[in-house]
Every structure is written in C-alpha cells, then in structure tokens.
Amino acid sequence: DIQMTQSPSSVSASIGDRVTISCRASQDVGIWVAWYQQKPGKAPTLLIYAGSTLQSGVPSRFSGSGSGTEFTLTVSSLQPEDLGTYYCLQANTFPRFSFGPGTKVDI
Amino acid sequence: EVQLVQSGAEVKEPGESLKISCKVSGDSFTKYWIAWVRQTPGKGLEWMGFIFPADSETKYNPPFRGRVTFSVDGSDSTAYLQWSTLQMSDTAVYFCTRRGPNGWYGDWGQGTLITVSS
C-alpha cells in the first residue's frame, strides 16, 4: 500500500504569512494527489486536485505543486479562516486511496 | 447544488448491528461513485471504499473488506454503510463523499459519529 507522510505535523503562523506544507508518497503516484482542509467538527473540504488544480470556489491564495512522490500545498497569505488541519490524499491506486496524517495550522 | 445528508449519531454496544445512511440530492444519484471515509483520533482519515449506485458495484479498501457492507437504495437516492457485529474499535466519525465531474471527491456529508461502548 502507498503511504503518505506530511511535514510539518503542525505550524503556527501569523496573518499574511506564506505557509508551505509538504507531502511525500512512498511510491510514484503521478499527479493523483488532492489536498483537503478540515475544520474542527466539519467534513474535509477539497482545495486542490490533480496535484495543482484549484477546486472551484477555493481562494486563489491556495496553490498546489508536485508530481511523482513530492507534493506541496502553499497558502500565499494566511487568513484567519485558514486555521484547521490540512491533509493530502493519494488517489493513484483504486480503491486503495490513502490520506496523509495531517498538518495542523494555527493562526 | 449537490448535498449529502447523513443520519444522526449512534451509541451502540459491542456485538450489535448498525446501518447508517447518506442521502444524495441535487444531482442524478446513479451518476458517480460514492465513497465512505472513517476518521479516528488515532488513525486519522481512512478511505474505506466505494460503491457505484447505478449497479451497486462495490470496491473495498482491504482493511475494511469483510468488516462493513456498502449498499444503496436508488429509489431513495440513499447510500448505506452497515456493520453486522460492531466492535469498540469501530468507534469513529464516518463520512460519505461523492465523486464529482472533475473525477475527485468534493462533495461530503456532515459525518456520523458512531460510539461503540459497553
């Protein structure tokens, strides 16, 4: 099975900061990676899919990059509503999708 | 707008059975795969598997095969997740999610908290 790791596990940043979260896959997953944001008590929200495509309705301060085994989510200017936990998901091996452990972002 | 509305929280004892639901509205129910995701404090988010509502084809992620059953009722646009024998380790929040036109899972239910305790 494909294992996903994320770093850092948590980050504390200020409003307006640039925040970068990394995700590594244990084997090549092409561009079959998505990024989700989850706020406490809520369902995950899709931010980025296919490695770098912004989901409709998601602010343009979010961006994704990478392919193969290394992926990055960047928030260009952190806003108060961006607090939460961010997860990468690999969707390369149907039906064995798998999430990373998450990165908690504190403001 | 697609909406997925899940059934409410449940408290059960080990050994009991349970069926929770996920009702889809706002789009053709049979068009796209529906998936189930488990969330626990210890293991985080885990993708359980998929069901295709048009023909009830199921695909289980191996850790969940044999432990749960996916089903649908097309007449009611509802997907179900079922356990025949609950264990304390099944305590978790369960989400349903649906594949969208872009091929990715962007529509989610609000989650159902299942607590299994003696």
Image (tube, coloured by chain):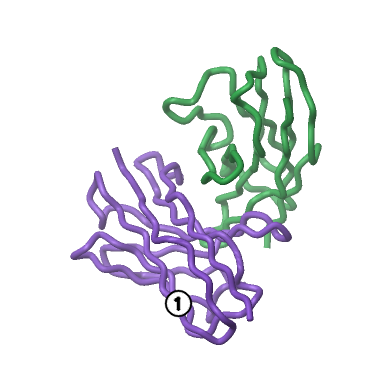
Front-lying residue, A15 or A35? A15
The residue at the point 45 percent across, 49 percent down is B110
Give the side of residue A26 with respect to residue A36, left or right: right
Return the residue found at the far left: B75
Residue B73 position, x and y percent, is 26, 68
Quarter the N terminus of chain B occupies: top left
Chain shown green: that is: A
Graded by Cα atoms within 10 Å as few (under 14), some (14 to 19) or many (20 or more), the crowding at tag 1 reads some
In this view of the protein, which residue sits in the foreground, B53 or A106? Answer: A106
Name of the residue lying farthest toward the top: A16
Q: Give x and y (percent) for residue A55.
A: 47, 30
Q: Is residue B25 left or right of residue B47?
A: left
The correct choice, above or below, for A77 with respect to A102 in the image is above
Residue B33 lies, in percent from the top left, at 37, 56
Q: Label 1's element?
A: strand
Q: Amino acid at mark 1?
A: Leu
Chain hosting mark 1: B
Q: Position of residue B10 (x, y in %)?
A: 49, 68
Q: Indicate the chain coloured purple by its letter.
A: B
Q: Quadrant of residue B30?
A: bottom left
Q: Is residue B52 above or below residue A83?
A: below
Asked which quadrant contains residue B46, the reply is bottom right
Q: Label 1: which residue?
A: B18
Say which residue appears at 57% left-offset and 56% top-offset.
Answer: A97
The C terminus of chain B lies in quadrant: bottom right
Q: Residue at x 40, y 49 (%)?
A: B99
